Image (spheres, rainbow, N blue to C red):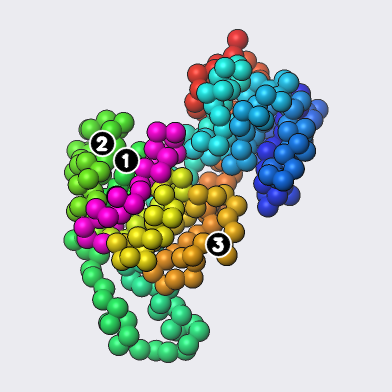
């Protein structure tokens, strides 16, 4: 039985001991490195796999057509937009994801971005750490409002959105949210007002995205949405970069339509930061898709993704954490 890990060049040498320890004795293990300039090598390394494990390395139709034996693709994430799961269904390949492993970490990270932007942390750190200045006059000139009483608008009210809401309410924020796929009871239980996206754009001091990326919501936040943000909010995205028209977001910052931006994701999973015009600005905080990270979450991610492959190949699809394309094997 052959298990292949699909990786980017930056992660090809990572420690896979947790996953490998869970594979059946005698398993063959391979690594396929995604290089857009050498896709043939990538496809070749994947083609005879019985199971594939991928964090974010793409598995599109061209790749899937090359697979000879693959029965399952195990995604090391909660989102799975980088796998053509519908085409996998046609080919009889199961696609599974990890329903939850980093909810608390991402919610913590979201609040960190909100607090750091609200409190002007990048500016203050430069003044103290680099310029060795100990004063508050220039900070006062920036203008800074109390977080208590501000309105946080959450788009996407799944596990992470709800965990973020709980944290924001503890800071005294008023929370409003939108998610047409969530049981309305969750809004009542958490004391969160269920509103439309238009109301979020109009009423929020901070807007935070918490959805999986799908074909339907790709670039759902566009230029016209930024133009309707009446309170010039801080804009936070710890979900997926593809949810936002990136160029429109950059322009919104330049035009003062948003007060600041906090991102853990960009459209590309391997961006050239020299090409991102808002890098280095003091009303912008960008982290390298690291919101999910803790020693605890990484262990869970690696363990569950490996267990999913093994359960499925052992004919136990009912034990797989989350099959997302309806292929349950024979």
Q: Residues within 10 Å of mark 1 (few under 14, many from 20)?
A: many
Give the left or right position of residue 142, taking residue 5 as reference: left
Label whose residue precedes the other's in the sequence (3 or 2): 2
Above-or-below relation of 2 to 134? above
Callout 1: helix, strand or loop? loop
Foreground tag (2 vs 1): 1
Q: Residue at x 42, y 89 (%)?
A: 133
The residue tagged 2 is: 186
Which quadrant: the N terminus?
top right
| Magenta extent | 206-232
Q: Residues within 10 Å of mark 2 (few under 14, many from 20)?
A: some
Q: Can you give x and y, in whole percent of width and height, for residue 212 in the image?
A: 43, 39
* Residue 250 at x, y percent in the picture: 41, 60
Say if residue 108 shows up in the picture: no
Q: Secondary structure at mark 3?
A: helix
Q: Nearer the viewer, residue 191 or 57?
A: 57
Residue 54 or 266: which is nearer the viewer? Answer: 266
Above or below, 271 relative to 29: below
Label 3, label 2: how far apart the Cα atoms are: 41 Å
Residue 43's spot in the image, x, y percent?
73, 33
Q: Looking at the image, is 150 positioned above or below residue 127? A: above
* Residue topped by disc 3: 275
Which image quadrant: the C terminus? top right
Which of the two discs, 1 and 3, labels the residue nearer the N terminus? 1
């Amino acid at each position: 039985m052959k298990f292949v890990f699909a990786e980017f060049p930056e992660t090809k040498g990572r420690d896979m001991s947790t996953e490998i320890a869970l594979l059946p004795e005698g398993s063959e293990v391979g690594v396929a490195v995604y290089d857009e300039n050498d896709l043939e090598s990538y496809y070749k390394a994947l083609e005879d796999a019985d199971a594939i494990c991928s964090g974010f390395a793409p598995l599109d139709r061209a790749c899937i057509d090359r697979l000879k034996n693959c029965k399952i693709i195990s995604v090391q994430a909660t989102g799975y937009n980088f796998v053509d799961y519908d085409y996998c269904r046609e080919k009889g390949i199961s696609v599974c994801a990890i329903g939850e492993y980093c909810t608390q970490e991402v919610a913590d990270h979201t609040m960190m971005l909100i607090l750091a932007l609200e409190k002007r942390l990048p500016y203050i750190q430069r003044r103290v750490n680099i310029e060795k200045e100990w004063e508050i006059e220039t900070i006062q000139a920036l203008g800074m409002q109390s977080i208590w009483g501000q309105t946080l608008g959450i788009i996407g009210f799944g596990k992470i959105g709800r965990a973020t809401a709980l944290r924001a309410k503890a800071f005294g924020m008023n929370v409003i949210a939108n998610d047409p796929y969530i049981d309305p009871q969750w809004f009542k239980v958490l004391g969160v007002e269920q509103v439309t996206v238009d109301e979020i754009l109009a009423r929020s001091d901070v807007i935070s995205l918490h959805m999986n990326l799908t074909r339907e919501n790709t670039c759902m936040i566009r230029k016209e949405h930024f133009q309707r943000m009446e309170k010039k909010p801080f804009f936070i995205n710890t979900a997926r970069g593809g949810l936002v028209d990136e160029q429109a977001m950059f322009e919104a910052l330049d035009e003062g339509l948003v007060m600041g931006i906090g991102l853990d994701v960009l459209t590309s999973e391997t961006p050239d930061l020299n090409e991102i015009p808002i890098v280095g600005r003091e009303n912008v905080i960008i982290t390298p898709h690291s919101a999910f990270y803790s020693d605890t979450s990484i262990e869970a991610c690696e363990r569950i993704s490996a267990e999913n492959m093994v359960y499925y190949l052992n004919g136990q699809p009912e034990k797989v954490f989350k099959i997302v394309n309806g292929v349950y094997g024979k």
